[in-house]
Image (spheres, rainbow, N blue to C red):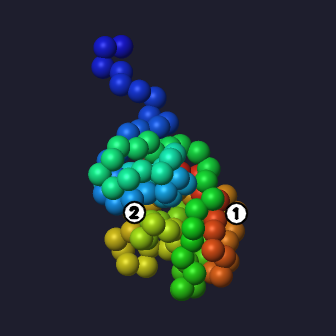
Amino acid sequence: MKNYVQNGDYVEFTAGATITSGQLVQVGSLHGVSVTDVANGAKGTLAMEGVFTLPKLTAAAGDACTAGGPVYFSSGSVSGSDSSGTRKLVGHSLAAAAQAATTVQVRLAN
């Protein structure tokens, strides 16, 4: 195919801030996990597919995650609810995570 670009498992991005390896990054409506540390303004690579342990919000009851339930982006972390009505879907939780849990395993959905 003449118009094929790449398989999309990994994509390049330009960091708008300093990013650490393993950090969840939002680019528009897409979410990926940074493969390496990336300096502000530099190009890096995001993993767009797979399952990752991600930081989870703990402040509200809605931050709990259910097995197979949606998880949403909020300031570099994820939550089991879109309480503000503006959070973007990151993926789905592989297991339940209580409100107090600080991480959750998420299958990315791009």
* Type of amino acid at the residue the image marks with label 1: Ala
Q: Position of residue 97 (x, y in %)?
A: 67, 72
Q: What residue lies at 36% left-to-right and 25% top-to-bottom?
A: 5
Q: Position of residue 44 (x, y in %)?
A: 40, 44
Q: What residue lies at 50% left-to-right and 68% top-to-bottom?
A: 77
Tell whether 72 sits left or right of 87: right
Q: Secondary structure under badge 2?
A: loop
What is the CA distance from the residue labelled 1 to the residue labelled 2? 20 Å
Mark 2 lies on residue: 88
Q: Is residue 2 above or below residue 25?
A: above
Q: What residue lies at 41% left-to-right and 27% top-to-bottom?
A: 6
Q: Quadrant of residue 22?
A: bottom right
Question: Dot 1, how many residues are within 10 Å of its Cα: few (below 14), some (14-19), or many (20+)?
Answer: some
| Residue 66 visible (yes or no) | no
Q: Position of residue 66 (x, y in %)?
A: 64, 69
Question: Dot 2, how many residues are within 10 Å of its Cα: few (below 14), some (14-19), or many (20+)?
Answer: some
Q: Is residue 31 above or below residue 43?
A: below
Q: Quadrant of residue 101?
A: bottom right
Which quadrant does the N terminus fall into? Answer: top left
| Residue 96 visible (yes or no) | yes
Q: Quadrant of residue 67?
A: bottom right
* Type of amino acid at the residue the image marks with label 2: Lys
Tell whether 46 sits left or right of 96: left
Specify the farthest residue to the front. 39
- Asked if labels 2 and 1 touch by Cβ distance under 8 angstroms, the answer is no
Specify the farthest residue to the bottom. 60
Task: In the rendered structure, find residue 95 and report the number of the disc placed on it.
Answer: 1
Report the front residue among 43 and 94.
43
Q: What residue lies at 42% left-to-right and 71% top-to-bottom?
A: 75
Specify the farthest residue to the right. 95
Q: Secondary structure under badge 1?
A: loop
